Amino acid sequence: MNPKIFIGPMSKNIVDSIIQVVNEGDMAIGMIPSRRQVEYNGGYVNNWKTNEFINYVRRKTDRVLLERDHGGPMQGYKNDDGLESYKEDSLCGFDIIHVDPFKKYSDIDMAAQYTIGNIIFCNHYNNNCYYEVGTEEGIRKYSHEELDEFLNILYKQLGPLFERIKFAVIQSGTKLQSGKNISKIDKRNLFNTGEATFQPIKPKDFFTKVKQDMIDTLEAKGIKDVRLDEVEFPGDTMWDIYYLYNERPITPYPSDME
């Protein structure tokens, strides 16, 4: 399942509309509820508890990827550690959980340690779950150097669990206020964030590997005799950065998230 868009389910009508769209068309969409929208003890969307929301969607379609948005301390209606919510999210079967302790812990090292602990905690209850890490500008703005430092800590301390991280929030200049983007989009942040210091593959070898993977994909689809020098690098989009951090070949969208 490769959703190109994730939508916040702000009402039951939106949830039903997404389900109708994916069932009638040839596409997948992700739903990404916040803790205030859907929570273990009920949220403002149809008063759904976590298990009720997930069961409702699963009964009606298998073409929606479900991600918890901004899980973590102080992300719900009260000042908590977020663990009860994480536990329910894991047990109920969210496909992805966004682990975001930055609202309470703004220090990069401290946020990294709590991110590591929360991923280990969630994995204890559901070892099939994937994760998103980092936060948005509105919670804690960070530079690409700080994000690099943050991801390096996770990379060094999580071990094999680091492979379960599918997304990292790259702050490229989007900050919403009153329905408007009040920040400035800067593509340089996307490019700079891609310079991950823990990347063990030399740039030349890495991009050669990327191109060869693209050729293999084309040949698998029946397009033969593609030369390496004819393949263009797909760009510096967030998906590319995601694959760079996960040491996987770059493709337009994640292909291994079943």
Image (cartoon, grey):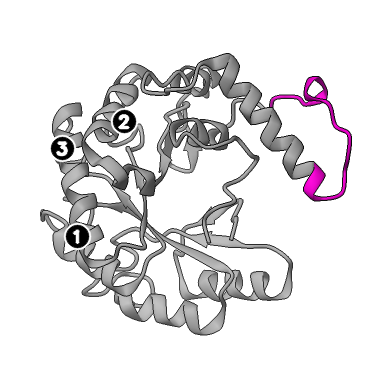
Residue 151, disc: 2
Choose the circle earlier in sequence order: 3 or 2.
Answer: 3
Whether residue 69 is situated above or below residue 136 in the rendered picture: below
Residue at disc 3, secondary structure? helix
User: Residue beneath label 3, please?
Assistant: 113
Left or right, residue 121 beside residue 148: left
User: Residue beneath label 1, please?
Assistant: 77
| Residue 225 in magenta stretch | yes
Left or right, residue 204 beside residue 117: right
| Residue 109 in magenta stretch | no
Taking the spot 45% from the left edge, 26% from the top edge, the residue there is 183
Q: CA distance from mark 1 to mark 3?
A: 24 Å
Stretch in magenta: 219-233
Q: Residue 47, located in which quarter of the rendered image?
A: bottom left
Q: CA distance from mark 1 to mark 2?
A: 29 Å
Residue extending farthest front: 225
Question: In this view of the protein, which residue sits in the foreground, 138 or 152?
Answer: 152
Contact? badges 1 and 3 (CB < 8 Å): no
Q: Residue 113, located in which quarter of the rendered image?
A: top left
Taking the spot 42% from the left edge, 29% from the top edge, the residue there is 171
Left or right, residue 240 beside residue 168: right
Q: Quadrant of the N terminus?
A: bottom right
Q: Residue 216, located in which quarter of the rendered image?
A: top right
In the rendered structure, which amino acid carries the disc numbered 1?
Answer: Tyr
